[in-house]
Image (cartoon, grey):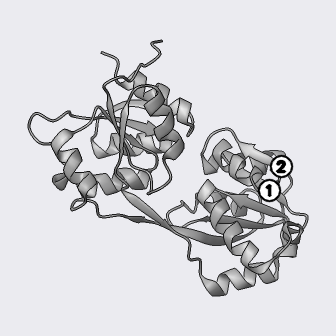
C-alpha cells in the first residue's frame, strides 16, 4: 500500500460536530483532504422524572446495558451530577453493544462483563439470554430515542427479565443545506462520503435535493460504518461502495481505500 493511498482524495464525514477528530487525522495522514458535514446532532436531556426514579433505585439493578458510546456518555454525565463516587453504581454487571461502547465504558475505569462482537443490539440480547440466567433480573437499558425496542423485548420475552429503559440522549436531524459546508459540498463534491449511522443516512436523503453536487463536481461514493447503516444506504437507493468492519479510524480509512479502487 502506498504511504499516501488517499492522496488528492476529498472525503466528507457526516458525524455530529466535534466527533470526527480522530477519523479526520488518520485520513489526512493517508493524504486525503477532509471536510465535515454534520447531518445529525446529539442532545443529552433525559426525562428528569424517569432519571430521578432510576438513580434513587440504582442499587436495585442486576445489569446495566449500554447500546452506544453516546449512551455511556449521556448516562455518566448525569450520574456524576448526582453521585460523587463511581462506586455508587453498585455491584451490577455491565453489558455493551459493540467494541466502541465497551471502550467508552472502560474510559470510566469500569470493566464490562459482556460485549457483543458486532454493534448490534440483538446480538447482545441473544448472548445474554443464552449465556446468563437473567430470569427475574432487573436490567437498566441506557439508550437513545431512536434505538429499536427489540432488545428490551428480547430480554423480556426470552430472558424473562425486568427491563427499565432510560433514554439518556436524543438523535435529531440537523438542517445543513444553508451552511457553508453544504455550499462547498455542492461546488466541489467529494470522492467519498462516510455515514456512521442510519439517522445520518436518513438526514442526507431528506436534504438530498439541496445537497446535489453541481455539474463537474466529484460524485461521492458512499461508505457505511456497520451493517445496519449499510442496509439503510441500500434501502435508500444509494449505491454502497464499501462497509467499514468497525467504527475505528483505521477500519474507516481502509473501507474508503476499498471504495475508491478503480
Q: Residue furthest top?
A: 1
Residue 203: give x, y in percent of width and height: 33, 57
Q: Earlier in the sequence, mark 2 or mark 1?
A: 1
For the residues labelled 2 and 1, the Cα–Cα distance comes to 5 Å
Give the side of residue 175 with respect to residue 4, left or right: left
Residue 102: give x, y in percent of width and height: 71, 48
**What label does residue 71 carry, if any?**
none
- Say which element carries label 2: loop
**For mark 1, what is the residue?**
94
Which residue is located at x 76 percent, y 80 percent?
Answer: 82
Please tell me how crowded label 2 is: few (under 14), some (14-19), or many (20+) other residues with Cα within 10 Å.
Answer: few
Above or below residue 11? Residue 75 is below
Image quarter for residue 55? bottom right
Residue nearest the observer in this picture, 123 or 156: 123
Tell me the quarter of the image containing the C terminus.
top left
Asked if residue 243 shows in the view, the reply is no
Above or below residue 2? Residue 202 is below
- Say which element carries label 1: strand
Asked if residue 66 shows in the view, the reply is yes
Residue nearest the observer in this picture, 247 or 233: 247
Report if the CB atoms under discs 2 and 1 are less than 8 Å apart.
yes
Residue 50: give x, y in percent of width and height: 66, 82
Image quarter for residue 7? top left
Q: Residue furthest left?
A: 215
How many numbered markers are drawn?
2
Which residue is located at x 78 percent, y 64 percent?
Answer: 161
**For mark 2, what is the residue?**
113
Above or below residue 81? Residue 99 is above
Residue nearest the observer in this picture, 105 or 161: 105
Which residue is located at x 45 percent, y 28 percent?
Answer: 255
Amino acid at each position: 500500500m502506498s504511504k499516501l493511498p488517499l492522496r488528492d482524495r476529498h472525503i466528507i464525514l457526516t458525524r455530529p460536530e466535534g466527533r470526527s477528530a480522530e477519523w479526520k487525522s488518520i485520513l489526512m495522514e493517508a493524504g486525503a483532504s477532509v471536510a465535515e458535514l454534520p447531518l445529525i446532532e446529539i442532545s443529552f436531556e433525559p426525562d428528569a422524572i424517569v432519571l430521578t426514579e432510576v438513580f434513587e433505585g440504582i442499587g436495585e439493578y442486576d445489569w446495566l446495558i449500554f447500546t452506544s458510546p453516546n449512551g455511556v456518555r449521556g448516562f455518566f454525565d448525569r450520574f456524576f451530577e448526582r453521585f460523587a463516587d463511581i462506586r455508587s453504581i453498585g455491584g451490577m454487571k455491565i453489558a455493551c453493544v459493540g467494541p466502541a461502547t465497551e471502550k467508552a465504558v472502560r474510559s470510566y475505569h469500569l470493566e464490562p462483563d459482556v460485549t457483543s462482537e458486532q454493534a448490534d443490539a440483538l446480538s447482545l440480547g441473544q448472548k445474554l439470554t443464552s449465556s446468563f440466567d437473567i430470569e427475574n433480573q432487573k436490567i437498566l437499558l441506557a439508550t437513545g430515542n431512536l434505538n429499536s425496542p427489540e432488545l428490551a423485548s428480547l430480554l423480556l420475552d426470552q430472558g424473562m427479565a425486568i427491563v427499565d429503559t432510560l433514554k439518556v440522549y436524543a438523535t435529531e436531524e440537523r438542517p445543513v443545506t444553508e451552511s457553508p459546508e453544504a455550499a462547498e459540498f455542492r461546488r466541489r463534491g467529494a470522492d467519498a462520503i462516510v455515514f456512521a449511522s442510519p439517522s445520518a443516512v436518513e438526514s442526507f436523503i431528506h436534504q438530498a435535493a439541496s445537497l446535489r453536487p453541481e455539474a463537474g463536481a466529484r460524485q461521492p461514493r458512499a461508505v457505511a460504518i456497520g451493517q445496519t447503516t449499510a442496509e439503510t444506504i441500500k434501502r435508500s437507493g444509494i449505491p454502497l461502495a464499501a462497509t467499514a468492519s468497525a467504527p475505528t479510524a483505521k477500519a474507516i480509512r481502509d473501507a474508503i481505500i476499498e471504495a475508491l479502487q478503480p
